[in-house]
Image: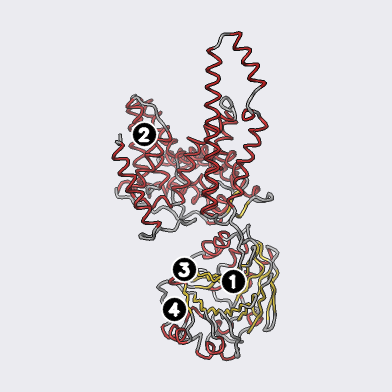
Amino acid sequence: MIRRPLLWILTGWILGELLAAWLGLVEVPASSYYASETPDVSLAFLEQGKAFLRESLRRLSADDEEEGIFTALMLGDKRSLPEDTYSLFQNGGIAHIIAISGLHLSLIAGAARRLLQKLGLSKKTAALAAGVLLLFYVLMIGGAVSAWRAFIMYSVQTGAMFAKRTYDAPSALGLAGLLILLKDPLYLFNAAFQLSFGAVWALSVAAPVLTRWLGAEKSGIKRTVIASAAVQLVTFPLVAWHFYKLPLYGLIMNLLVVPLTGIALASVFAAALAALIYVPGGVFLCGLAHYVFLGIRWLCAQMLRLPGALWVTGQPRTWQLALYYGLLAAALVLMKWRCRKAERQDRERKTADAGAKTDEAEDSTDRRSVCDRPAFRAAAALLLCLIVLFLQRPARTQAAVTALYVGQGDCIVLELPGGGAVLIDGGSNTIENAGTKVIVPYLQKQRLTQIHAVFLSHPDTDHINGISAVLAELTLKVEMVCASEVSRGCEEYEALREAAQTVGADWHWLEAGDRLKAGEMELSVQFEGLQAENTNDRSMVLLMEYEGFSALFMGDAEEAEESAGAPWPRVDLLKAAHHGSRFSTGEALLEQTRPKTVLISAGRNNPYGHPHAETLERLAAIGAQVHCTAEEGNVTVELRK
């Protein structure tokens, strides 16, 4: 047992590390939606075992998608899982079913204990042997946070059995959190840590309180529904914080899918073991999991067709999370207090004589507290659900220009007050799937669901290869896509035109002088580009005007286009052309535009040397304030009235 003084010392050290992170003294790693645990196996036989299991799963799988699902389900490795499949599960609110969790470890431990007991081992010895097996399994899969949490809690449960003590799940959860944070206190900021511990806390603390308060102790179905609802209530803010959207039918999906997942998991484990002896037998056993996941994918697809299936909340403010959890905690405390009071009153009535007891029961029925009435309970439950509305990020009150960090590429987001946005380009040469990993998450984080227009300056991949993800995203409505007339017939645009047509977005070819209004913001084509083989010099140059503020977006225009498009208007902001190349943003352009602020989009440590020293010298000479994404990440300029 950990003695109290040591507990306080360890807790103080963890809090000190977290305070250092909050003050910026240490770097906090950003949690990523697509991050996978990287295996760190130090024992050769575990590494060989993992490779063998991976090969067995490949043989058992019907296709690459199924192989990715089974590998994630059994080994916790999502790297081979297709992004559209993971996105489907995430949008359905069931992505946790393919993460190593307590379900996996309880299945392994339970099967191992029963098998060992049938072989003649005692209950305690079988439990200890199963724990050793779980440790090897956790090490083999790379030690994900959720797996370590489940292993530590199983160890505490086994220890309680040996010590003949009562197992307390909240205490075991607290010990697991303490041990994991001792390894690295910054795990506290990790999405997997927060969601795993939040879900188990909901099941072990919040769900029992709700069950007692609603009087559902004797109904297995009600207890299951309440437990799932408790998990949703506790984890919704964390999901909104990390992923910026909520699956509103997640409760129903989990009630349907989690039992099926247990069946599929047992099927995959049994198939993997059978394949060690006879591969066709393993394929036969794996058939159940195959059809289960076909059904799960179908359920997710149908759910996403329902109205309001996904609610884009944006990233809530810190005060919203504090308010939400404060209200939830107050509600749980009040419910627990009321339940204890009712139990105390029941005990007091039982001590009275039979006649007095009957009279008191009748009186208590007449004077029953409003807290005990079904109507009040229903209203309180509804109110508890409505506090989820506090999670929605407030819309911007001012327009803004944001240069996203997409590595070596370009993406500008023009944000309008009250919601809505315009995109200028969206691609990267250094970040794979930048549209899915960077552009779409940023739009969702800001709660931008209405994209009035997407402007494509020219057809280079580092400017357009993320736009297909924007068009395909269910939570985004794109009204139109605009490209320069000089690029008509360009092969690189054909796939985008088809994607735009599929989602109902109009496609427009623009020429110099064409204008578009989005709310109070007006965008005009200042120059449509040159008829040149060099795609950079075919860049469409856009002028944005908003309540006296102006900005010029140069695409990848170089010296020839800068000369041909002159004279250029004076502007407040300039998006430097071609990532700050030495052959762009020349002296003549700067002398005419005289920008106060210059944005440069470039990748960190890029091989081209962008932004070039000569370009930076020219910008310094005119006194412009320079912001480069390679150094600052996302750069936002608010357009204040």
Instruction: From the viewer's perspective, tell me whether residue 466 is left or right of residue 193.
Output: right
- In primary-sequence order, the first of circles 1 and 2 is 2
Secondary structure under tag 2 reads: helix
Cα distance, mark 1 to mark 2?
57 Å
Residue 382: give x, y in percent of width and height: 64, 39
Residue holding disc 1: 640
**Looking at the rendering, which quadrant does residue 19 occupy?**
bottom left
**N-terminal-most mark, 4 or 1:** 4
- Give yes or no for contact between labels 3 and 4 (Cβ–Cβ under 8 Å): no
Q: Position of residue 108 (x, y in %)?
A: 42, 36
Amino acid type, residue under disc 1 in the picture:
Arg
Of badges 3 and 1, the one in the foreground is 1
- The residues tagged by marks 2 and 3 sit, at their Cα atoms, a distance apart of 44 Å
CA–CA distance in space, label 4 to label 1: 30 Å
Q: Earlier in the sequence, mark 4 or mark 2?
A: 2
- Identify the mark at residue 610; answer none if there is no mark: 4
Q: Is residue 599 above or below residue 115?
A: below
In the rendered structure, are the residues bearing label 1 and label 2 in contact, judged by CB atoms less than 8 Å apart? no
Q: Is residue 595 above or below residue 520?
A: below
Position in image of residue 410 (x %, y %): 53, 73
Q: Nearer the viewer, residue 571 or 457?
A: 571
For label 2, the residue is 156
Kind of residue indicated by mark 3: Gly
Amino acid marked by disc 4? His
- Numbered label attached to residue 633: 3
10 Å neighbourhood of mark 4: few (<14), some, or many (≥20)?
many
